[in-house]
Image (tube, helix red, strand yellow):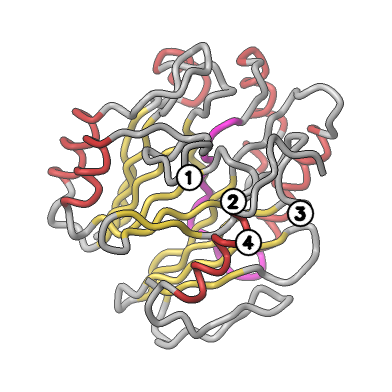
Amino acid sequence: MSTRRDFIGTGLAGIAALILLPAVNTFANVNNEYNRQNKGRLKLRFALASDIHYGQPDTDYALNTGNMVKWINADHAKNHLDMVIVNGDLVHNRPDLLPEIKTQYLDKFNMPYHTIPGNHDFADAALWQKNFGYEDKYTVEFGDIAFVLANTADTKGTYVCPDNVFIKASLEKFKDKKIVFVILHIAPFKWQKDDFFVDCPETMELLHGYPNVKATFHGHDHLLDGIRYTGDKFPHFFDSHIGGNWGTDYKGYRIVEIDDQNAIYTYQVNASQNPVLNSNKL
């Protein structure tokens, strides 16, 4: 598959997920099953997928989008999913296609779903409200678990930092929650100079400043499917891609599970029919 650059980061990310994160001793098999240390009851299980690029010329975007819905619905049928988050780049430079991808594909998920814009959606709060019923930054709550989702691009596709006033207000609101996750299509930190991300020191200070913020989840770089760290081992997870014409050879999504002891497990699914790629416990 073609790529924007020669890049070894996907391999390094997978290695980092195995050797740097504490207590990584569980690996999923070809049936997406793995042995959690704690056999507690799951109180939340959700999927993250990104980078559909619906409408990109010379790609099988309809097939890719249909496959995503099929794969995640099949996962849900086997082991209940409470929701799916579609983390940006739903469409490819065609915001006029947002109603189409919503009604013809996303509305066919058999579980609730949430979306956030990416740099190829060319969307602002008004457009997202019109198409999905909520703005381009919002929060979701599941009991003592909360999600903060925010846009990281403008209507021309320029990378921007998220609204840090909103991020701070949301993290303050949720400071008594057990677990908070932040969902940003574009990571707010550049690990190396040619990363397709943007340095947002104020955002990073907020993420590192609340102990109950356990991880961020990103899309955008189709080659990344593992984990990178900032600060004192603060994890940023990536989920490969669903569509587009570059990235990992496979297409997939990420699963996150939280048990009743608040242990967090996550693994990347190679939905194009190979074993699960990596598995992590936070």
Q: Earlier in the sequence, mark 3 or mark 2?
A: 2
Residue 110 visible within the image:
no
- Residue corresponding to mark 3: 250
| Amino acid type assigned to the residue bearing label 4 in the image | Gly
Q: From which residue to which does the magenta span run?
A: 76-89
Name which residue lies at 65% across and 48% down: 7
Q: Earlier in the sequence, mark 2 or mark 1?
A: 1
Residue 35 drawn in magenta? no
Is disc 3 placed on a helix, strand or loop? loop
Q: Earlier in the sequence, mark 4 or mark 2?
A: 4
- Residue corresponding to mark 2: 224
Residue 244: x and y, percent? 73, 34
Is disc 1 placed on a helix, strand or loop? strand
Residue 85 drawn in magenta? yes
| Amino acid type assigned to the residue bearing label 2 in the image | Leu
Numbered mark located on residue 11 in the image: 4
| Amino acid type assigned to the residue bearing label 3 in the image | Tyr
Residue 173 is left or right of residue 32, and the answer is left
Numbered mark located on residue 218 in the image: 1
Tell me how far mark 1 sits from mark 4, CA to CA: 17 Å
Q: Nearer the viewer, residue 226 or 146?
A: 226
Tell me how far mark 1 sits from mark 3, CA to CA: 17 Å
Q: Residues within 10 Å of mark 1 (few under 14, many from 20)?
A: many
